[in-house]
Amino acid sequence: MMEDEWLHQLVGEWEWESDAPVEAGKESQDHRGSETVRSLGGIWIISEGRGNAPDGTPSTTIMTLGYSPGRNKFVGTFVASSMTDLWIYEGFIDRDSNALVLDTEGPSFADMSKRTRYKDIIRIIDENNRTMTSSYQGESGTFDEFMTLRYRRTGT
């Protein structure tokens, strides 16, 4: 499967749920939302998510993903109405786990004035189910998972 074909498995209407904590190290809360993923020219995908931010206010997210043959990497961006950072992705397909592994950098949970590395992993379970797991690089250098979104397709 070519890189753009892998991405286009995500195109469609989705519902998601997560039990992410409101703050790192705090008790988890149930979150739900929806997402529309569309193709842009058969090269890019654009995902628009809707749900609530950890503080309960409505939040919209936009993710763009594509494959850059010149860089031999997946590239993309992520923004959210509840955040002030533009997250820039670079990544690759892990064919063994049918997952897109995306690296990025953003504010540290421990100290918002510092930056740290993050990893988002989008894993295709089957044509109607996928997950996205987010982790951050802790002080020890290992990546600690802090959120998993579980997606279920609701339409094409």
Image: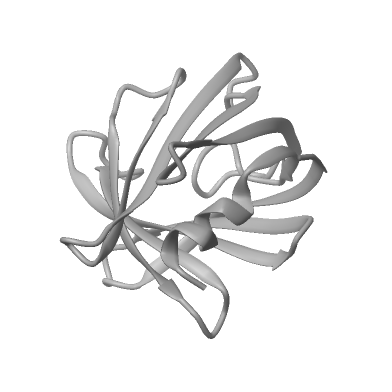
Dividing the picture into quadrants, the one containing residue 51 is top right
Give the residue at the far bottom of this rendering: 96
| Place of residue 135 in the rendered image (x, y in percent of width and height, measured from the top left) | 44, 58
Taking the view exactly as shown, the residue that stands out farthest to the front is: 41
Where residue 23 appears, x then y in whole percent?
52, 38
Looking at the image, which residue is at 79% across and 46% down?
153
Which quadrant of the figure has residue 106?
top left
Side (left or right) of 116 relative to 154: left
* Residue toward you, 117 or 64: 64
Residue 20 is left or right of residue 103, and the answer is right
Rendered view: 23 above or below 3: above
Q: How is the image coloured?
A: one colour
What residue is rendered at 46% in x and 44% in y?
A: 42
Using residue 16 as the reference point, say whether residue 50 is left or right of it.
Answer: left
Q: How many marks?
A: 0
Residue at horizontal 62 percent and vertical 44 percent from the top = 11
Percent x, y for residue 76? Answer: 33, 44
Q: Nearer the viewer, residue 104 or 19?
A: 104
Q: x and y percent of residue 83 in the render?
A: 39, 24
